[in-house]
Structures are given as structure tokens and as C-alpha cells.
Amino acid sequence: MENFEPVIVAFVCNWCTYTAADLAGTSRLSYPKNVRLIRVMCTGMVDPQYVIKALLEGADGVLVSGCHPGDCHYINGNYKARRRIKLLKEILPQFGFEPERLRLTWIGASDGIQFAEIMRELVTELKELGPSQAKLKMVV
Amino acid sequence: MAITATINVKDQDLLGSLQTFCTAILTQEDIRAILVPQRQPMKSMVMPTLVTAPEQLDGIDPLSPAFPMNGAKVLAKLTRKPSGGKIAALLRPCEIRAFIELVKLKQARTEDVVLIGIDCLGALRNTDYFRFAGNDAAAATQRFYEGMLAGKETALDGVELASACKSCEHSIPDAADIALGLRGVDIGTGILAQAQSPAGEALLAQLNLPAAEVPKAREDALARLLEARTASRDQMFAETAAATDSVEKLSNYMANCVNCYNCRVACPVCYCKECVFVTDVFNHDPAQYLRWAQRKGAIKMPTDTVFYHLTRLTHMSTACVGCGQCSNACPNDIPVMELFRLVGQRTQEAFAYEAGKSVDESPPMSVFKEDEFQEVVGL
Ligand code: SF4
Ligand code: SF4
Ligand code: FES
């Protein structure tokens, strides 16, 4: 698995983490191309179903990232997201998905540097963990 | 002081006494109807029946091992809006617990209903029930409750209790307004009736039943039952956990699922009016199937099977009351309940929640605190 390049699906909220990713881009900060950003209006709209779909389709990691507590543009979407991530973390490990494959972070709109750092860290971690079981098996 | 009373039993005729009890309720001025399991004239099946005429209470059968559906769903239909009167409903404990979940989801109301629960002696899967009952449902009920109360917990005439019932730790109707007790009670003379809420208290007072005390033997009988059920539940959890501990094993567990979605139709707490899996979202473009097949070389059709079950687990396992209707409804004998209870146990524990316990506890996904679950945030 020397050349293993993990695929990461990241659901990022429009107002904070997506803006941070944009800032990283305009600041010419580089971050690994393993990350597929999916812009959502708020982390509060990420149904657990989206996370499951990404994992079953073979994503090696899923990131949900939005505004810091108190900063959500819809007031409390990120608190709801946190509960859903907690829920998923109770369920997914039963089926062999390592807890590290699902991450939740808060990255504010001006945190371009932090965004790039977290992406790098995530990729390093997932490289160590290796490919997801769902990628290797035919899941029906 | 909560009323504890006794419903007299003559000639060991439990169903007769329950009929007298239901008649007394139905003749109260403020009760317009009673929802109660009743034998249907054409077949041996027992179905929830809405009765307004006391003389139509013949053939009620709340002790039958038939459990064709979770009655919470029909009671929700009857209570979702005011109907201009009060009704009583005689249900199994898991039906009451599912009803409480529906109340919290605003799909049912407690205002116009008095919930009457009865010690549940268990139920049989539909297919087993028909074999057990033959064409005499009344005799089957008697054979069943006599056997169960004599402690033949798991098998009777070669049929086994549904696995949901074998592993149920909630067979006592804790959340009912009025609880009827059979276990640890001398049912030769009377059935125990206990008021557990102001509404139950009011109705039971109107009935003027002879006062009674909870027999000493009851506590003991319930403790023994709970111990056996918990042990069987834990064994079921261990087996189910081992059988599904990878995506590959989960696929295998679900291998004969045909995506009929009967399990979610039968589930009393699958609360969406329209499940996303039957909408156009999952009516994929034909070209999409070909792309999927091409990427992996082959895909099983129908697709989205494991996806469906995992999604349902995230959507409703916190509300699962373990009634077993999902397994009962599955045409392919997939142990659906086993998986949902296993996961439900964990998700409910994670949010310190117990499905069906009280209308005052909010469903975990409907609330949040600003300062919680910090451990899931960050790398
Ligand atoms: S998932 Fe199955 S056991 Fe749980 S409440 Fe629904 S039908 Fe009952
Ligand atoms: S009832 Fe059985 S076959 Fe139908 S969707 Fe549920 S598990 Fe699959
Ligand atoms: S808008 Fe960013 S998390 Fe809600």
C-alpha cells in the first residue's frame, strides 16, 4: 500500500469551511488533492445518509466541517451536526468502519492556513490507516 | 395514593374477565370507544379493533399470541387530531412504547386516550401463529397463556416465541395509564389493575373495582423473568454483533433482502410519511446503473440494500422499541429486529435515552446542548 492515495469526501459549509478552502486557494496554500469538497449550506443539512453513501461508495474518509460553535449562520446547525456525527460514530464501528474515517471539525472563514493543515493531517492519518474495507469488497 | 384493584376472574376464564372489564370501561359516559385486539370472524387472526358497542366485545383476545402489527400505528391514526371524545386502548407494552415515540414525533396525541397495558406473555411470528392456532383461535389463546404463565417461556407445542419477545425486558406496561398484571398474581381469583397516571387513576376510580394489593410473589416473578430475558438479549446481541462486524458480513447478513421495504412499513416508529428510498432519489437513471456496474465489474440488483438498512439505523434506531415487527414482516426471514435492537441499544445509550419510556424525554436528534460531545470534534 506504498502508493495508497486515500479518497476523502468533505462536506463543508458554505459560510465557514468552504470560505476557508477558498481562502487557502487564493492564498496559494497547497493542500493534498485527495480531498473532494462538497459545498453544503450548513453542516446541519448533512444527513447521516450522505456520510454512509460516501463510505459505501469507497471513500476512505469523510469529513464534515463547518463554523465554530456560536458562528453557524443558521444559529445551531453545527450543534445538530455534532449530534449526528456522534450518532454515526456509535453505529459505523459495528460494521468495521474505523472511527478515524469519520471526522468533524470547525474551520472558520478566515482559517485558510488551518484548513490546509487539517487536510494534510487527515491524509497522513488515512494513509496510515490504509484503504477502507468497503472499497475492497463488493457492497450491495 | 394510586389505586390498586382486582378484576375478578371466574372459572379461570381470563378472557371473560377482560371482556367484563372492557365492557365496564366502554359503558363509562366519557369513553366513546375502545381499541382492543379481537378475533376476526373469518380467520384465526386477531387484529386491533375499534369497538363502540359493548355487545361487540365478544371475541376480544388481548392474550392471544397473534401479533400481526404494532397497534401504535393504528392508535396514532385515531389520536393525531381531537376526535371529539375519549377512547381507551388496550395494547401490548411495546405498542405503548412505540405510541409514546409517535407522540413525541407529533404524529399522535395522548390527550384523548387512556392507555391500558397488560403484562405481555409474548407473541409468535405470523407463520408460527397460524400453525399454532389451527382453526380454533380461542383454544389457542388459552393453551398459550396457560403455558406461558406456567413458565414454558420459550417453546410451546413445537413453536418458539418470536425472538423479539424472548429477548424483551419490557414486558410489563410501565408507561400505561392503567397496568393489568398477570405475572406473580393469583389469576385464579383476579387480575391486578394498577393506576399509573392521573388519567388512569380517574378511570379506574369510576370502575369501582374491589381494592387489592400487589402480591408479594409478583416482584420476584418479574425479577426472574427480567434476568432470563436480559441473558437471552445479551446472547442475541453478541451473536448479531459477531455476524455483522464488517461491511462484507453485513452484506452477507442482508444477502437475501429484496428491498421490498416491508420492514420499514411494519415498523411503528419509522416516522417519515414518505421514505426517501421509495422516492425518485433512488429511481436512478438507467445509465447510472451501467456506470456502477462498469466501475466494479458487477453490481447486485436491486442496488442500495445495505445503504437502506444503514440509513434506517441512523434515522430510527434511537426510537426502536424492539417489537420485532420488522422481522415478522420480512418475506425472507432476515433477522432485522436483532440488528436494529443491537444498534438501537448503543445509540440510545449514547444519548442517555430510552425509547418509549416517557413523553417527557426528547428524541435525541430533536435536541442538542451547546456544550456536549466535544470528543467527536477535531482530528
Ligand atoms: S426496527 Fe423493528 S423492532 Fe425496532 S421498532 Fe421498528 S419494527 Fe420494532
Ligand atoms: S422486509 Fe426483509 S426483504 Fe424486505 S426490505 Fe426489509 S429486510 Fe429486505
Ligand atoms: S452555516 Fe456553517 S455550520 Fe451552519
Image (cartoon, helix red, strand yellow):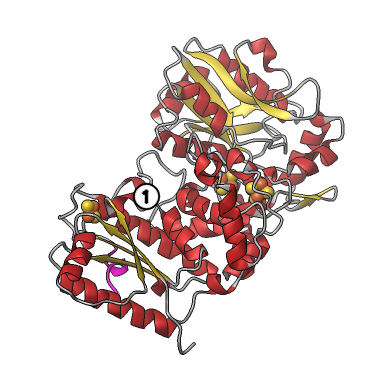
Residue A133 image point, x, y percent = 54, 74
- SS of the residue under disc 1: helix
Examine the rendered structure and indicate whether residue B69 appears above or below residue B322: above
Which residue, as the protein is rendered here, is positioned at the far left?
A: A110
Residue B84 lies, in percent from the top left, at 44, 12
Closer to the camera in the image, B304 or B266: B304
Q: Position of residue A136 (x, y in %)?
A: 57, 74
Q: Is residue B96 visible?
A: yes
Q: Which residue is mark 1?
A: B364
Residue B278 picture location, percent across and down: 56, 40
**Chain part drawn in magenta:** B373-379
Residue B80 in which image quadrant: top left
Q: Is residue B257 left or right of residue A96?
A: right
Quadrant in which the C terminus of chain B is drawn? bottom left
Would residue B216 be seen by someone viewing this image from the given angle?
no
Residue name at image x 38 percent, y 45 percent: B363
Magenta run includes residue B375? yes
In the rendered view, would you say B57 is above or below A71?
above
Q: Residue at x 42, y 72 (%)?
A: A7
Q: Is residue B104 left or right of residue B328?
A: left
| Residue B150 lies in the magenta-colored region | no
Residue found farthest to the bottom: A2
Q: Residue furthest front?
A: B287
> Is B11 situated above or below A27?
above
* Chain ID, mark 1: B
Q: Residue at x 59, y 38 (%)?
A: B265
| A134 in relation to B181, above or below | below
Quarter holding residue B126: top right
Q: Nearer the viewer, residue B133 or B306?
A: B306
Name the kind of residue labelled 1 in the image: Pro
Mark 1, Cα crowd under 10 Å, few <14 / some 14-19 / many 20+, is many
